Image (spheres, helix red, strand yellow):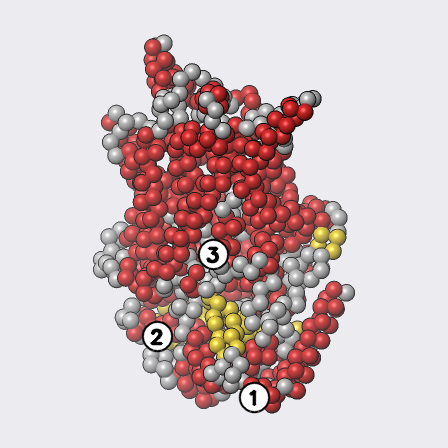
Amino acid sequence: MKLGVKAAHPNTPSKRRKELRKNLIAYSFILPNLLGFAIFTLVPMVFSLGLALTSWDGANQVSWVGLQNFKDLLDDSTFRISLENTLWYVGGTVPLTMVCALGLAVLLNQPIRGRNLFRTIYFFPYVASLVAVAVVWNMLFFPSAGPVNEFLRALGVANPPRWSASVDWAMPTVIMASIWRNMGYYMIIYLAALQGIPSILYEAAAIDGANAWQKFRYVTVPMLTPATFFISIMLTITSFKVFDLILVMTNGGPGRATNVLVMHTYNTAFRQFKFGYSSAIAMVLFALVMIITIVQFTMERRWVEYSQL
Amino acid sequence: MNKWLNRRTANVCVALLVILAVSGGFISNRASAQDEITLTMSAWDVATTPYWQAVIDAYEAEHPNVTVELIDVPSADYQDTMNIRLSGGDDTDIITVKDIPGYSAMLTRGQIVPLNDLIEASGVDLSAYSGAAEELTYEGSIYALPFRSDIWILYYNKTIFDAAGLDYPTNDMTWGEFGALARELTSGSGADKIYGAHFHVWRSAVQLGTVQDGLNTIISDDYSFMAPMYDMVTAMQKDGIIMDYGELRAGNIHYSGPFENGQVAMLPMGSWFIGTLVAAQADGVFDFDWGVASYPHPEGVAAGTTAGTLTSLAINEESDNKDAAWDFVQFYTGEEGAKVLAGTGNLPALRTPEILEIFASKDGVPVEATDALQTTTVRLELPMHPNVGEVEQILNEEHELIMTDSLSVEEGLEETTSRISEVLQ
Amino acid sequence: MALTYILLIALALIMLLPFIWMFSASLKLDKDVFRFPIAWIPQNPQWSNYQTIWTRIPFLTFFYNSLKLTAIITFLQVATSSFAAYAFAKLEFRGRNILFLAYIASIAVPWQVYMIPQFILMRELGLVDNHMSLILLQAFTAFGVFLLRQFFISVPNELLDAARIDGLSEYGIYFRIMLPMSKPALATLTIFSAVFVWNDFMGPLIYLHSESLKTIQLGLRMFIQQYSADYSLIMAASLVSVIPVAILFLAFQRYFVEGIGTSGIKG
């Protein structure tokens, strides 16, 4: 995508009319989605983010406080901790989930027996209800007698980690759960994209004498870049917004060891009724995500190859 | 300024209502037969908690023109959901108040109606709630009336005591005696391990014992007073007298499991657990004998001093049927409601000897219950305070750190003190 | 090849282990669910748990509501998203980049932040406690537009230009070329939307009051009560609730298998 598409300079009436027609057709495609999206998402969103400059308790009157909420963030230890935890979580989940998802997709795109079954199984964790997943995961990683630690002890680890019951291991436990849950999801996107690679490209590569690795490196990877681009953006954004999984697994604990930004936003809004302050936290999160996303978009031209055969 | 305006409008509303109610008194009596009124009421666990509907049925039988609809919200998400809905202008008539942080949130934001004038007009006797009404009073106004009140007591497994050849706990036991007894009761290892006692993961399970003496409350500017209790509990944990906190938390382990499996000799827990145990025993889930005693108390504090929680009813500021709602609230929190509640195996806030008798005579309730439920002083688990939600969150976080041994008792309580002081100033 | 199978089966076991545990727990008495060491095969299997979930709460009604919402919202999402995505991917128009950026930006704002204004809006429209509120809130997603745009964009322009020369309108191209060529992508979005709606908890929690309108995820939480939780029933209900999604997934598999291959694409 070119970030700055130059609008054609219409100089004759017929050109202008043609231009207008073109625009109108495009808008007609977008309109059904845009209308609903603008009314039910965009407007409430802008309203909420605007609250960042105010003080509001969710019931009484809204009062303007300017940048005070942002100043208060500097002294908020929970904000600092949840920001660090969020970055830690994003740094842990994004690359690992992508690698796992790609690996699974390539593995399952081969002509093997029972491939539909395998795909379904790998997608399963994403489908299961989160409450059940949290319970099961904590059971498997139960410190004293859970299967994971039994296994580690059998391997000779005398003091296996206490996982979600320990301040140091809670975040890695959550990250593992998240990868386990999400890799099947992104695998699907890769699978769909793999289907879009024309087999003629592989045939051509075979004629040139390419081996399996070379085919993967020089055909598959470049052809998957639009999907990879999409996944890297979506995964980054959703990881920054992580909430539900942590809520049910650790509820931000022990202490504040797994508290993340959205959890802090939620708590300040619905438990402490500082809606303005809560919006300010969300603004910081939003700014952070947007900077990263825009950087990703500007880099897009360098590495994403939209196939033009 | 805003607050003042809000309270004033609220007061005007209530005053108008009272005038309406009083002046319309005889008219509404005549009109009541044909005026169909539908009230809505928020509640939780409706499918598994019989008393909600039972009291409503009793009310509807007396008031055929009124229909009360329950709005069921999952209990774990109850207060958050209500906060979101009320902020969005929800008009459910009767709001059930589940805990003090929720109560505080709703009243400080003018979402529930002060009841003082209605109480005066209807002649409700608040002293009948033995202190509970005072606990709900904030700056001279009361915004909810309690219908259910639970206190903390001690459950014990008689079979384990018999096997160890020890006497059952008495209604006058100090925490020190409790700790020593728990050590004596602990035995075995692996799958056969018997734990002398069980502390559930809640912060309150440990902290309530520190405020029984009435010298301190849960909202404080110095938490060092909690050290002795934490020292005792963490030592018990280290020595394997109680189950490990981190594991209970990670494994989502509910206190009923270990107790019903006969792994635990003594369990300090709320009186609501009586009903659960009675039902489980009747279903054949376990087959040992159990008993109840008064909650242990610190040295020098009168026996029968315990902590409790209240469940109460409030009226939504946005309700269109405030007078009908008030009539229903009176019924629910009054004697008729209390009788129905006791009949379903729950402890009503209004406890006359007659009502307690209904409760204790239920099948399966241990004979000790009548004495164990006698209290001298009941302190609220959390006092009313505008910042109580934020304070509670900090208390929970620091409790976790102490109990998972991430911080020493001293460090944890120091951090609690400094973080909470910041909130309170 | 044997190595591939060993790897696949080992991975499948890791993915399934939690489900095996869920199944085992669903056959236990509640007090035994969290007992250690884990008894993978329950001594006295409680098959009645699978009956209880339908009688304790109106699970069948919830099931129907979830199916209904999932079907309607998924259809609307796929329809409106693919329509908009075509414009973003293949048409040039004024404000395209700004608008697209606004779509992406909206994904970056956590939903929790704007729940209240949305609720106020729905209250004003009188749609609280009505399935329509959830349909309107969830049918128009930025996610779907972004996902499909990424797939549409890699359909060769030459193909579209050829169709334009043949006199096909943009609508014709969308229906006759874009949609048929993007089956894997459409299948992907269908699955994602369906799973999202099926598993959504917060939306129904806030908007649906009446028992007759509630969904399966709300039903699951009904087994967690104030002072107790029936985890064996939760596990049984969770497993049952996974079945429709698994069926949907298996049914849509063929779109991943068939793919578009080289059909119709010649440089």
Mark 3 to mark 2 CA distance (whole Å): 40 Å
Chain of the residue on which disc 3 is drawn: C
Residue under the image location 38 percent in, 22 percent down? C264
Chain of the residue on which disc 1 is drawn: B
What label does residue B278 carry, if any? Answer: 2
Residue farthest left in this picture: C44
Residue designated by label 1: B29
Quick one: C166 or A296, which is closer to the camera?
A: C166
Type of residue at label 1? Asn
- Residue C165 spot, x, y in % from top left: 48, 20
Residue farthest right in this picture: B1
Residue under the image location 43 percent in, 39 percent down? C189
Whether labels 1 and 2 belong to a single chain: the reply is yes
Q: From this viewpoint, is residue B47 visible?
A: yes
SS label for mark 3: helix
Q: Are marks 3 and 2 in contact (CB under 8 Å)?
A: no
- Residue B351 spot, x, y in % from top left: 49, 84
